[in-house]
Image (tube, coloured by chain):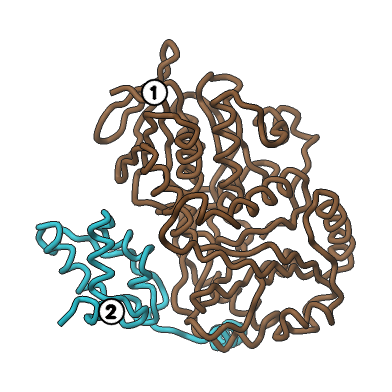
Amino acid sequence: MSKKDIIVCRCEDISLAELHTLMEQGFTSIEDLKRQLRVGMGPCQGATCLPIIQRELSIFLKKPIEEIPLPTVRPLTIGVPLKAIARGAKNEK
Amino acid sequence: MKNKIIIVGSGVTGASIAYNLAVKGVKDILVLDKSYLTAGATGRCGAGVRQQWATKANCIMAKHSIEFFEHAKETLHYEGDIEFKQEGYLILATTLEEDKQFAKNVALQNALGIPSKKLTPEEALKIVPHLNPKSFISATYCQTDGHLNPFKMTDAYYQAAKKLGATFHFFETVKGIQHHQGIYTVTTDKNTYQADIVIDAAGGYSREIGLMVGLDIPVYSEKHEILVTEPIAKMQGPMVMSFTKNLYCQQVPHGSFLMGRTTPNQPQGHDIEASHEFLDAMAKTIDDILPKIGELRVIRQWAGSYNMSPDKQPIICESPDLKGFYMACGFSGHGFMFAPMTGVLISEMIMNEPLSLETEMLHINRFNHQTTHEVEKSVV
């Protein structure tokens, strides 16, 4: 199967080929790749792509996977509509 | 190892300075950053670019910078897309006082060649139909304002500077700077370097870098928060902004909405944790001004540092006390949009070339007479 057809990030539709191109250009941390490709920035918050990218970087850099740091975990864990948050904030008082 | 110039910080400001110096033929430029490209304020910012300001210095800096952004892709020979969306800023007036101030602002902007104009609520609603008509009394609009992708824009400067021979070291923290007989010795956690010139472009940490050479730069850092929603089909052209209601909100080409506001009474410092207080206040503000957008889900929230100066305008100059030490800091939340001119001006100062702009109002000496400076009010 061609690397172009292997999807690494489903939220942003990023292929393994795009990931490898960036890695070859020197973007070899997840924080760097995230800012170039938006991987990990979609609605799933990286639940699918981050372990895959971690493994690809581990192979590329020839380092054990535990030495490939994950990016900062940011709220929210799951998408919530702004209106629901506004309603909650008003009702709290 | 001897360098001509060391730049501390590889946000958009440091990358722009490196490019502008390199394009003028300077060799031996070393850029040091304690993290990855755009890890600090640049990568956290809203990345809107506007010319609608209340002070002359900010208007001129912004106007020239936008002229650069319009051709940045070609000028920098960048293969990627900087995602420049030039569909204006719509700034809402919500009080009579603000309405009057905006009339003055537009007059100043027009006198400087910025094509902004005052709009009635009806005209504003034609541009952004989902505005709550009860939330404002008038607006100003400038079509040539816009938004870019801050990661790509900085990457464009970085790639162009690298091609011209500048060196970048990431994940290398500056620990100390000594100045002796005209030579700066910069010590990092990995190495020691020497240079004739040091440029402080450290964003949130500019003050700390100044203190290393004994300079007391009157800036401090303050946390500002922002969030992003799920992407949807295009529904909003311009950035919608209000100073009194404390909001900016923009749909980026990717489809998601970016929005931020200032949390009042932030303590000074380097805290950049996201807070639920911001999320609550942001949600209520959107529900008031742009209710339709309230239906979107929030995907993620984060924060970054504004590097604040006493008059909320940048400090761009050589230190009057220390030859060869240049500062580009205190942008007060607007370093991204001014970065093209910051790079041009610092490089012209270093090369002793005629300056593209009058820079007296950007000089640190303006704070010697604390009472006389004009504070920029058009800030969120």
> Disc 1 is attached to a residue of which chain?
B
Q: Position of residue B251 (x, y in %)?
A: 58, 75
Front residue of B164/B34: it is B164
Q: Quadrant of residue A47?
A: bottom left
Which chain shows up in cyan? A
Q: Position of residue B292 (x, y in %)?
A: 64, 88
Using residue B131 as the reference point, say whether residue B107 is left or right of it: right
Q: Position of residue B27 (x, y in %)?
A: 39, 29
Q: Quadrant of residue A77?
A: bottom left
The disc placed on residue A47 is: 2
The image quadrant where one finds the C terminus of chain B is: bottom right
What residue appears at the point 88 percent right and 60 percent down from the top-left corner?
B103
The disc placed on residue B359 is: none
- The CA span between labels 2 and 1 is 45 Å
Q: Amino acid at mark 1?
A: Ala
Select label 2 or label 1 by which is in front: 1
**Image: A63 above or below B211:** below
What residue appears at the point 44 percent right and 74 percent down from the top-left corner?
B300
**Residue at disc 2, secondary structure:** loop
Q: Amino acid at mark 2?
A: Ala
**Image: B53 above or below B294:** above
What residue appears at the point 58 percent right and 41 percent down from the top-left corner?
B342
Specify whether disc 2 shares its chain with disc 1.
no
Front residue of B367/B110: it is B110
**Residue at disc 1, secondary structure:** strand
> Disc 2 is attached to a residue of which chain?
A
> In this figure, which residue is indicated by the disc labeled 1?
B195
The image quadrant where one finds the N terminus of chain B is: top left
Q: Position of residue B168 (x, y in %)?
A: 34, 41
Mark 1 Cα within 10 Å, few/some/many (few <14, many 20+)? many
Which chain shows up in brown? B
What residue appears at the point 43 percent right and 42 percent down from the top-left corner?
B9
